[in-house]
Amino acid sequence: MTPNLFATLEIKTLNGNNGTLHLFKPFIIYPLFLFSGIALGEQSLDPYKLSLKELMNVNVTSNVASNTERPILEQPSIISVITREQIINSGARDLLDILRMVPGFGFAHDTVGITSWGFRGIYAEEGKIMLLIDGAPFNDPAWGNMELGWHFPVELFAKVEIIRGPGAAKFGNYAELAVVKITTVGHELDGGLVDVNYRNMEGTFGSAELTGMYGKEIRKGLAYSIALNIKDTNRTTLPLSNPDGSDQTDQNYSPMNFLWLDAKLNIRNFTFSTLLEEYSFEHNESLAATPDPDTVVDQGYERLHVAASYTKKISDKLLVNGSILYQEVVAHDMVVTTGSVYALPHGSHYRIETERSIASADATYTLSENSSLNVGIEYVDTYAHSAAVGDYFSGDPSGDSRDTWFQGSDHLDFNQNSVFLQYENYTDFVNFTLGMRYIDNSASAETVTVPRIALSKKWGNFGSKLMYSEAFRTGDAEHINLATRRLEPETLDATEIEFHYLAKSGLYTINFFDMNLDNAITFNDEGSVSNGGGIFSTGYEASWLGNWENHEQELTVSHYKGDDKALKVQLAEDGESYLGFPTYKLTYRLAYKLSDSTKLTATASYENEKYRRTDIGDVLLDSSLLINVAVTHQFSNKLTLQASIHDVLNEGYYYPQAYGSGIYPGPEREISFSANYLWN
């Protein structure tokens, strides 16, 4: 897509200097906007025309961690921000490609063909990381899950913001380990776009994708947008493996179809939006520990949501917000289309239909030039209905789980109320943030209060942060259904400290963390859910970013260490690492301006060996190095072409299970071609 698409929204991260520079400015200025966590957002400013002092005090457009816009290096959390141009120029195919370059994130396999995520070594499926798209939570109400691979229309992303650490005091349930907040393109496009993409996977069909959008401001206070994304994907051609690592069968059942349709309408202070999402895929893996090549499962997802929000600046000091969201979600609609005598017979079925309603309101009051208070309330009602004919879990296609799902009923209804506040005070001595959230969940055995406190300050080119946060996770519908008694919320406490230094050679950042998750909601050996033990992670994340007149480079390294007292179901035999996640990850990004109209982006992600569980004990999978290269050429203000290669070395990346012996392959080497056309 054209690099000029959001010149008024986000600073151009790959354009060279258009004016006179001091010799040292490319090294100390540009990194402020390119480092994962630093972006100007909606401010259309030229960094080369600003002094270093001015740049250090530029506000970000997002208040993802704070009440109001504040300099990114003083935000009360560890934050990463990935701009639209970085996403498009990298050739990213899905959210996996984007987050793979962010310190701390890793990916593993759940059951039934799902690619899931983890953070700092801790398995995060079933609602331990919050995903927000245009303010709406995408964690499904049945399990808190979602499929990450080949999911979501990255061509429509305007920005991805990430809190690398707990965010529950501000965002509530699911924001236990991290928060990923995605903003999509809206009426600011001021015209239309069509994007066509075709990918070839090692000589066979990879995917075909079409994205279309139109957005316009009709007059001041009245604007609209509509967007469509459809794709047909072959997720992999790699073979499944037995627990001993030998090939079991060719993976012939990996097609995926995807539809995304959303519309937004802005009328003065009101925003109305609606979204329809459907996707389905086939795979040949059962819930058994060993993948079964003879069992084919057709799995579908459906999502419909409508939302309305209101934002009004009552005065120079008072800003109020209110929103209502209604969602209907069908997750994991699984039907065994080809049965097996070894696992699930033909016709076994699983389907949970859910509805979620969220109403929230908050107000931010500016107490003074440097202090503010945000106070709000949120109400969440969840309804779940078992609609499966045939019992998938027992493998009995003649059974009927609808009347035996929740204590003899076919449905479940529960709600969660919360109150939250956050006070911020920025002074010459220290920046102080204090927040908390109180939660009362009708299905939990107890209420919970989670506080947060953050201190931050910069002195010249040096700065630091010290943060303590607590977070929580209450069970979703299936956790409540499978629990032998009322679940207590699992809780987490995290201590983080960050240092950053801006030098002529670039921006250097390092943070240290200690995370302790207690009372974890887990499956036990009997197939039920209960509160278990703890999961612990300590480590660091470091990065360097430098910029020259025609290129930039970014290098990150992240490391975690587990604890031998952690849950055995996830802890590897070495007592220091967790199943499915490497203890070390290194990433490298090069963005090179070949000419005024042609840019090259190369990314590399290295992971050390990681453990997977087998019948003969835990074994190590080889280290991996995934390299992607994309070349983007802008023929005109309207037409942009891109060619990219993913997994240049053809590593054949596999996702081991984070709590069992399952394993699932990712895509092989892919060659991609795309064309983007804009019109006004």
Image (cartoon, grey):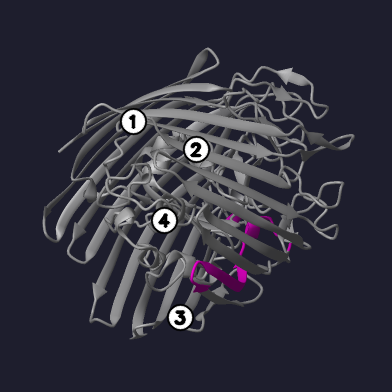
**Which is more foreground, mark 3 or mark 4?**
4
Residue hosting label 4: 29
Residue hosting label 3: 424
Q: Residue at x 32, y 45 (%)?
A: 17
Residue 153 in sight from this viewpoint:
no
Q: Is residue 484 above or below residue 674?
A: below
Residue range of the region highlighted in magenta in the rendering: 458-484
**Which is more foreground, mark 2 or mark 1?**
1
Residue hosting label 2: 590
Label 4 – label 1 distance at C-alpha = 22 Å
Which of 374/273 is in front? 374
Label 3 – label 4 distance at C-alpha = 27 Å
In primary-sequence order, the first of circles 3 and 4 is 4
Q: Quadrant of the N terminus?
A: top left
Residue 357 in sight from this viewpoint:
yes
Residue hosting label 1: 595
